[in-house]
Image (cartoon, rainbow, N blue to C red):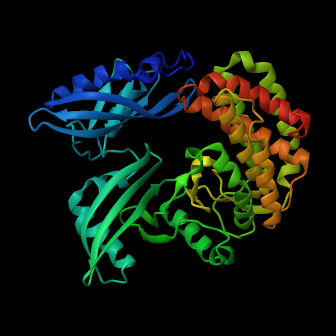
Amino acid sequence: MTMRFDGPEDRALPHLGQALNETAMAEIFGRTVRMHGVQLERCSVERIKYRPHRNCTLSYLLRLRDTAADRVFEQRVSARLCSGGDSARRAQRAGESLLLPSLAGPALRLLPMLDMLTWWWPNDPKLAAPRVLADARVVREQVLPELVAALSAGGGRLTDYRIDVVQYVPEHRLCARVDLLWHHGGERVTQTVYAKSSREPDGATAHGYLHALQSCAAWQRGELRTPRALLYQPAFDLHWQEGLPGRALLDLDPAQVAALAAPLGAQLAALHRTPVATARAVTAQSLRDRLHDVRSALAAVLPASHDVLGRATRHLGAGIAMAACRPPATLHGDLHARNVLAHGGELALIDLDGLRRGPAVMELGAWIADGMYRALLEGADHARDGAAWQALLDGYARGGGLAPLPHELAWATAWHLLCQRAWRCVVNLKPGRFAIAPRLIELACEVAGARSLEAA
């Protein structure tokens, strides 16, 4: 079924609607792959990063059939939708680099009628890891033997493996699940691990975060659960971590999530009090810069929200000094229900590449704002999960965290409603999200002005 995307009209990007239309792009990509003896069966949009009046980066997943071999396979295509004919200039620069043929045939394709330049996996303008993982010889002979040696204290021998790309953000990051099979003596061993590559933070930094966490007292006592760092391979720009069992909280029913709220609060308290040297920090200046950038992006595509956006940013701007002066804690940096795994009664925090130092209340506000956003997306009242939020705060306090003051928590929640949830609805353009961005802006203004969640 074709997914519909509802987004803004952008005069600088007149072909934005076509780029987001899976049926239209299937026709265009279909003509391209037919020249290589391949038939397109399905086209889906995986990821969007929209920069109003400038450009849009997209990732497509194609389902293709090799008509000669009657073989079905998938092909990822990343694309930059440009303005002012910039795609031709980018194509000229990209043509000077070494490109590899894709499974479908093309490596780089300019689509001048859309002012779009496309890179076909494993080609990426800024990440080397896709080429590494797509090279079976390098993976089997160089990458995985070193990993198996690290996992088996040097005694294991790789037998087989399977690689599945879990997340790919063109030019920014890659995460792949790797199922390993090796033999150690007479024993057959299977294990699931994850390979990650990112530009910010770089692999060494992200790997160091996990090492620091698993060395801390809370991790050793079992109060904090995060993936174990396994190996960093700078030559391949890959850092490896163990795969943890469980399902994301986002995939559980509300009753299960509510029952786990207090344990999650306790685990957040353990993370926050664990000192980790991070590359990034939440400061008054970083908050001011962020607020300015978000307001500019939202104002560019939501003119009807101009007045309420102004009021929301004034409320939030007035509270920056209050938030920034609080003692810094170690923050997850991207806390939401997709980045918490539940396995039975055990929880684990994953995707910790965004680790940073900052006020603990920012993390608590991020969790509540995400809950409000999910409720609005599902057509429910924004305070639907209020009891679960209180349980999380109670667990946080019992776990040694300092309970935030009501006005601080309201400010942090409003901050994330505007600067994360509303902003992402605009820049990511997922189905149904753009339509609720105005309501998120209004809610941010209401919560910030009320100075408590109960009064909002």
Left or right of 93, for residue 439: right
Q: Position of residue 51 (x, y in %)?
A: 56, 30
Q: Position of residue 77 (x, y in %)?
A: 34, 36
Residue at coordinates 84% horizontally, 50% vertically from top-left? 323
Quadrant in which the C terminus is drawn: top right
Please name whichever residue, 34 or 94, is drawn nearer the observer in this view of the structure.
34
Residue at coordinates 67% horizontally, 39% vertically from top-left? 420
Quadrant in which the N terminus is drawn: top left
Q: Position of residue 128 (x, y in %)?
A: 36, 54
Quick check: can you spot residue 95? no
Quadrant assignment, res 264: bottom right
Please name whichever residue, 255 or 390, is drawn nearer the observer in this view of the structure.
255
Quadrant assignment, res 149: bottom left
Q: Position of residue 388 (x, y in %)?
A: 75, 47
Quick check: can you spot residue 79? yes
Q: Is residue 392 above or below residue 156?
A: above
Residue sitting farthest toward the left: 68
Left or right of 377, for residue 284: right
